[in-house]
Image (tube, coloured by chain):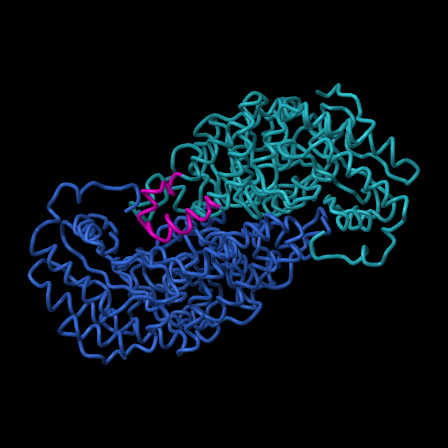
Chain colours: A cyan, B blue
Amino acid sequence: MTALPLPTTRDAALALDAADPLRGLRDQFEIPPGLIYLDGNSLGVLPRATAARVQQVVQDEWGRGLIGSWNQAGWMALPQRVGDKIARLVGAGAGQLVCADSTSVNLFKVLAAALAIAAADAPAARAIVSERSNFPTDLYIAEALARERGCTLELAEADELPARLARGGVAVLMLTHVNYRTGRMHDMAALSQAAHAAGALVIWDLAHSAGAVPVDLLRDGADFSVGCGYKYLNGGPGAPAFVWAHPRHADRFWQPLAGWMGHAAPFEFNPGYRPAVGISRYLCGTPAVLAMSALECGVDSVLAAEAFGGMAALRAKSLALTDSFAGLVAARCGGHGLRLVSPQAAAQRGSQVCLARDEGAYAIVQALIARGVVGDFRAGDGAALPDILRFGFTPLYTRFVDAWDAVEHLRQVLASGEWHEPRFNQRHAVT
Amino acid sequence: MTALPLPTTRDAALALDAADPLRGLRDQFEIPPGLIYLDGNSLGVLPRATAARVQQVVQDEWGRGLIGSWNQAGWMALPQRVGDKIARLVGAGAGQLVCADSTSVNLFKVLAAALAIAAADAPAARAIVSERSNFPTDLYIAEALARERGCTLELAEADELPARLARGGVAVLMLTHVNYRTGRMHDMAALSQAAHAAGALVIWDLAHSAGAVPVDLLRDGADFSVGCGYKYLNGGPGAPAFVWAHPRHADRFWQPLAGWMGHAAPFEFNPGYRPAVGISRYLCGTPAVLAMSALECGVDSVLAAEAFGGMAALRAKSLALTDSFAGLVAARCGGHGLRLVSPQAAAQRGSQVCLARDEGAYAIVQALIARGVVGDFRAGDGAALPDILRFGFTPLYTRFVDAWDAVEHLRQVLASGEWHEPRFNQRHAVT
């Protein structure tokens, strides 16, 4: 599918959609009519099943079942049940992954555990290494934990990581698989191998990967992983996140958020902590039942692709969509100072296209939103990192005609100069 | 209201309900017909407003508004907005309390911050002191953090706490205000004062207090506080929790869960952490929008009592209900080995009545549930702590006739011996 020719007309794009074996999966979602939504990498759209399922949980399970639903409606098993479904999308085994808390909190758990393992197995290694443009919350969690544990946090550019590992002294390599700004995807197998060769453990944040690109945690040598429920998994705003530990690590140490749901027998109410066997010790507080039920609908919407080739088929369509969009921008929006910053090589590309522009990126994104084309803006640092126009392509529900129409709107916004209007420069709290 | 005479007939109980100025507040809730629900201290009932509000969030704000709702629907401000409402129930100021994460995770944050303050101000004090029968998740979190920080966790009986504080070396006194097993309420002002006199900080877990008993954190000298959204605040199963820090402490240190939502400017995407001013630095990951919207409906259901005297009026009714229930058990269920273990003195009593029995407590609770009287069972330790039959009285929606009828069912269960039936001894996962 990546060899598809670039559509040269809107009809050609429509023909690609008509021939798309995954086209029916879009019907699973409530997408506002006329909207071209290219921001599923920030917040996935609403599955049609979710509203009814949430009502059932609220009115039947909570309203009528009350506390009996902890047993009868299976609330207690939600973290494991939804976790097992996500495991199928990321190459983890059944019983190895649970849903809980936020990505940030889960990262804290696994980084703390990884540092404990490193302290036991390779006490001289004191550095946490990450990518300078990793998503900031990952860096903040690592910065705080490095202070707690007397470690250092070292940030490097992506290309410098193998050399940094080879120099030694690295306890943990902590990376986000697909970079949130550039859409660049790391080679999980190669970097995991390099980390292990250097005596380091590796943590993979799958925020922009789970449900978007094929991931095989077990095959590719990951030690720990976390990920986000509200992006490509369509779990809803602030959905619970997930956490995975390789079985060889899961039982070795406590993680510090040793709450009662990670206890071997929470309802014995013992005053002393005795961690559950396996990944369940990475649970902490009471499961967020409403939110996790919504997340399950979102995960199911991705699993529905299994009947059509699963993640491999979604990946092929994602690459074709991002090829189309990037190619059409190059062909039809030239001369306006846009630079492609997401990778052209398929092996390095996530499911988004990122464009940089020296000025006006924020206003152009706002002008597109006013036209019903929703991407988003990610600020640069005024130095090496440029401002970014970011367009996410969720292959479950994004069409080739959406890519075509989005480029046409972008062309018009640039040609008309309408983005200079003052209203497009009024910054919102969330950008 | 605490001086109400014990109802001697069911009609007398109905008369008390007819005269109850808070009786209309029950209409806010969906309570299954015929059910006598005395477990709001485990999971509050469903407010009528919640289902529609959650649907609005799912279908309109998420489904149609998509990422624009972070700004336009006020999602970003939910932790502070709901937090300000809870603050009114616990004697905290506006802008001092936020909703986030679980009680366990929030306890980790404030205990870590309190230990950092203690390490700076009183480095010789290395003990975390708590109550032996504190809710286990609090003890587990403290146990794990004590290991991390090289502190000790010392558990004492409630009556031993002042003497332990006076012996010195205590960094943090960490208590749950109302004991989950016994319903005994600590004197927050006296213990906070004793802690401060001993150079210690004090953390109050309000899981069984917020929305049930009057709390005045600022007046009574609390340093930090956390609490639960799904008990007396009626926020739904696994609802987000809350966290408060006294303004004199809030800005002093980071808490270790330094996620992006606690950053001073999360959408600048800086690689270095710069904590927000005040309580917002106790946020971590992305707000759980669906769950927090449901919680807001629950908190509103408690705030509705403000028109009828607020927490003072709720407290008066709670004491009258627990007086009625305990008095009727004594009067009508004698000779069956039940012992009242919740305090008779109003000043020491939370909003629950706890009965101990040497055997059969679990089965008696199950037999009551089969009759539509929902309390719960809390296991003892086979030694000093007895098995408990626990009955929570949420004054927002519990009636005097419920107390009467519950005692009548209990009398019949005991008199008939029906709790000996094998089906009432089949243990569930959650008890």
Label tally:
0
Seen in the image, is A312 located left or right of residue B246? Answer: right
Q: Tell me residue B402's x, y (percent).
A: 23, 65
Q: Residue at point 79% right, 31% down?
A: A10
Q: Residue at point 76% right, 51% down?
A: A370
Q: Residue A327 occupies which quadrant of the picture?
A: top right
Q: Tell me residue A134's x, y (percent).
A: 69, 39
Residue stretch rendered in magenta on the structure: A52-77
Front in this rendered view, residue B224 or B388: B388
Q: Is residue A61 magenta?
A: yes
Tell me the quarter of the image containing the N terminus of chain A: top right
Seen in the image, is A258 located left or right of residue A378? Answer: left
Front in this rendered view, residue A195 or B417: B417
Magenta stretch, main secondary structure, is helix
Q: Residue at point 44% right, 39% down?
A: A79
Front in this rendered view, residue B343 or A11: A11
Q: Tell me residue B226's x, y (percent).
A: 46, 60
Determine whether B147 is above or below A3 in the image. Answer: below
